[in-house]
Amino acid sequence: MYDDYQRLLVEKSGRLATVTLNRPEQRNAVDHQMHVELARIWVDLAHDDDVFAVLLTGSGDFFSVGGDVKGMKDRPAGDVAKEGAVLDPGGARRIVYNMLDLDKPVVCAINGHAIGLAATVALLSDITVASTAAKIADTHVKVGLVAGDGGAVIWPLLIGPSRAKEMLLRGLLVDGAEAERIGLVNHAVPPGEVLPLAREIAQELADGATWAIRWTKLAVNKQLKQQLNLILDTSMALEIATFNTEDHQEAVRAFIEKRKPEFTGR
């Protein structure tokens, strides 16, 4: 079932499946193929009767730095809508909804930096364990884009609208310890303890009262889905619109040239 995945490594041990974002040489940056696989994996896990809980993490020293900014430079305009996830079933909309539709609990080991869409995926997990050294942020605005792929939904739910707006509008990074303090993640521990603690929690859930755990998750997720239905289509449409702005193109050029962007409002 999982042999043809190219960007995700899926390993099963007893009732527990471990899903690893697996592009360590690119700091697990999310390209189009990973988009597709991040949408599909939750469906495959839902249909796998041998899996009772999921542990999600990243390979190497990063969870994921998010979207591949360098890859945005040469993307044709026609591809923006596809990869922006409104028309592409492998896009962010399917990632988010398929993840929340999975009734099996997901524990995320945020072993390193989690940025942009990767932060959204991590924070949509049911329980999060972050490294105190990890930086978590939704930096869409830093590349001239709307935080459209779920950040506008999950950040306010976790830390409140006022604090979330400052984080999203300024593209601020928060370390694991501060993320725990403000309620963005459940636990923050030293780097070497992240995966063991996350695995311990995931195994506890895998061995627990199956239907009580699954249906409790589905009940709580009703609130998340309500917010998604209210916000996500609009935020993604606005994100697609910002792909076509000069400010976005300038941000990409500045990123590649390693300089501060000069935004003009065009």
Image: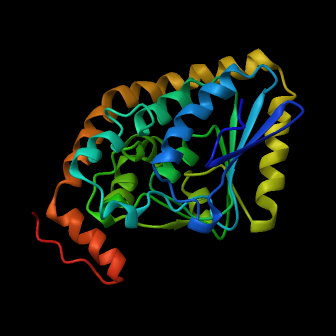
Vertical order, 5 against 259 (above or below) = above
Residue found 39% across the figure and 62% down from its top: 71
In the picture, which quadrant includes the N terminus?
Answer: top right
Vertical order, 150 against 70 (above or below) = above
Residue 261: quarter of image? bottom left
Image-based side of 100 in relation to 16, left or right: left
Residue found 54% across the figure and 45% down from its top: 121
Vertical order, 36 against 143 (above or below) = above
Image-based side of 83 in relation to 24, left or right: left
Residue found 62% across the figure and 68% down from its top: 25
Residue 228 in view in this figure: yes
Nearer the observer, 194 or 83: 83
Residue 190 in view in this figure: no
Q: In this figure, what is the number of numbered marks?
A: 0
Image-based side of 197 in relation to 45, left or right: right
Where is residue 173 drawn, in percent x and y? 47, 67
Residue found 75% across the figure and 17% down from its top: 212
Residue 59: quarter of image? bottom right
In the picture, which quadrant includes the C terminus?
Answer: bottom left
Nearer the observer, 106 or 37: 37
Where is residue 57 drawn, in percent x and y? 68, 51
Nearer the observer, 78 or 55: 78
Nearer the observer, 110 or 8: 8
Where is residue 207 drawn, in percent x and y? 87, 28
Where is residue 7 drawn, in percent x and y? 61, 49
